[in-house]
Amino acid sequence: MQDPRLNQLADVIVGYSLNLQAGEKVLIEAFDDAEELVLALIRKASAVGAIPLVCWRNNRIQRELFLHATEVGMELIGEIEKYRMERVQAYVGIRGSQNASEFSDVPQQQMKLYQRYWWKPVHAEIRVRRTKWVVLRYPSPSMAQQAEMSTQAFENFFFDVCTLDYRQMSAAMEALKALMEKTDQVHITGPGTDLCFSIKGMPAIKCDGKLNLPDGEIFTAPLRDSVNGEISFNTPTLYHGTVFQDIRLEFKDGKIIRAQGSDTEKLNAILDSDEGARFVGEFSIGLNPKITRPMKDILFDEKIAGSFHLTPGNAYDEADNGNRSEIHWDLVMIQTPEYGGGEIYFDDRLIRQDGRFVVAELEGLNPENLTGMQ
């Protein structure tokens, strides 16, 4: 018997996140798991008159492709994937995984081939810019173990957080969006952290269930050369199959001039991918009341209530500070008391302390005021 929560999730994806219309072509790309969700999406998309296409992938096979890829071979794959992406109007990416560390032993130069010839031209330049898209995970024992939860508890958490009332959350975000777009200077303090930058004139973008599930953040971008100071991230991050912890960055005039962490050599190799990798392409404030601790999955961790993230690498078109890079690496800092606290100031005005908004117009975004959005 199919879990009824799959139909509820498929309804959110088709009816809200993508707002699929009759005649639109939607590519459903699923990794490793999620067979039942793919079936539900085919039914829901067909019911509204859309045309579903399915691509089924396996991360072990992906790893083998990456390990043995040549520049010519990866360029050919990218051209084929680009041809398909150009012919759809919508995209669903279901990132299932049986092993979150599957790519941990793929050399960085091989991952760069993937980034350059597959990810950038297909996803960054076509899917993100030209289609209606949404990306989500799918609950699995591997993800539950990574989150240090039982399989059943993680599954319950997953469906709970992915089917929030994102329409209501979107309305509550308006006040923070407006304030960010009026702000010049941002000052962030906390343990090992004293960082300043400008977001003057940059748009603030609400992430309210349209592109990611789960969702719940508002992002912008620092002016490229304005970031100065230091920051010590307190959240583990999984990037290209490797878990990094205790990342500490020092900035001067926008550039990361020193980077340290649990794997300093690999960290700096990633930041040396290209010139833009040492500059910041995104600053975002996490708001999802159902996500309260890290689970080494950025799709969840970047939404943690009381957190923010800073992103070395490529800027998004919606909030574009001009930075270009093959990487986009969201690094999360949680500022709730359990994680050491911290402050965010907008133009010398304290707007969030220890993870809670402390100005009247933003109090509606504190967790107790959002948790009723079921």
Image (spheres, rainbow, N blue to C red):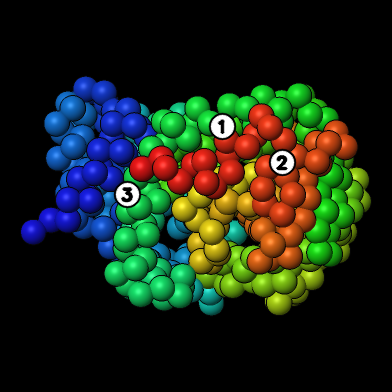
Q: Position of residue 294 (x, y in %)?
A: 55, 64
Tell which circle, 2 or 1, labels the residue nearer the N-terminal end: 1
| Quarter where residue 20 is shown | top left
Say which element carries label 3: strand
Q: Disc 1 designates what residue?
A: 173
Query: Which is nearer the N-term, disc 2 or disc 3?
Result: 3
Q: Which mark is residue 353?
A: none
Looking at the image, residue 182 lies above or below residue 64: above
The answer for how far apart the CA atoms under marks 3 and 1 are is 30 Å
- Residue 151 at what x, y percent from top left? 32, 72
Report the amino acid beneath label 3.
Glu
Total numbered circles: 3
Q: Amino acid at mark 1?
A: Met
Q: Is residue 194 above or below residue 130?
A: below
Asked if labels 1 and 3 touch by Cβ distance under 8 angstroms, the answer is: no
User: 332 and 69: which one is in front?
Assistant: 332
Dividing the picture into quarters, in which one does residue 46 lie?
top left
